[in-house]
Image: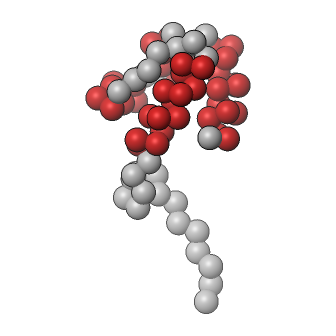
Amino acid sequence: MKPYLIFDFDGTLVQSKDLAIRILNKLSVKYGGRMINRDEVEYFSEMSISERMHALHIPMYKLPALLIEGKRE
């Protein structure tokens, strides 16, 4: 039997949106930003990264550390 690797980017197999929001909120508070709720996800998805960081009140220079820690989570 051949091994297969399946990617699930749209939430068909695993609903990861709630996990992503929990991690974002945890790190956002740690890095001096504000938390978001589930209703804001679509609003944020239409923004650029710099616009998101501004809306979360997190300076852009903190983004690399936030991404590294977020990946670890």
Residue 43 shows in this picture? yes
Q: How many marks?
A: 0
In the image, residue 43 lies at what x, y percent? 33, 24
26 sits left or right of 71 in the view = left
In the image, residue 41 lies at what x, y percent? 36, 30
Q: What residue lies at 47% left-to-right and 35% top-to-bottom?
A: 22
Displayed quadrant of residue 45: top left
* Residue closest to the eye, 5 or 23: 23
Q: What residue lies at 41% left-to-right and 61% top-to-bottom?
A: 13
- Of the 4 image quadrants, the one containing the N terminus is bottom right
- Of the 4 image quadrants, the one containing the C terminus is top right
Q: What residue lies at 54% left-to-right and 21% top-to-bottom?
A: 28
Residue 51 shows in this picture? no
* Residue closest to the eye, 55 or 18: 18
* Vertical placement of residue 66 versus 9, above or below: above
The residue furthest bottom is 1
In the image, residue 68 lies at what x, y percent? 70, 33
48 sits left or right of 11 in the view = right
30 sits left or right of 10 in the view = right
Q: What residue lies at 67% left-to-right and 33% top-to-bottom?
A: 69
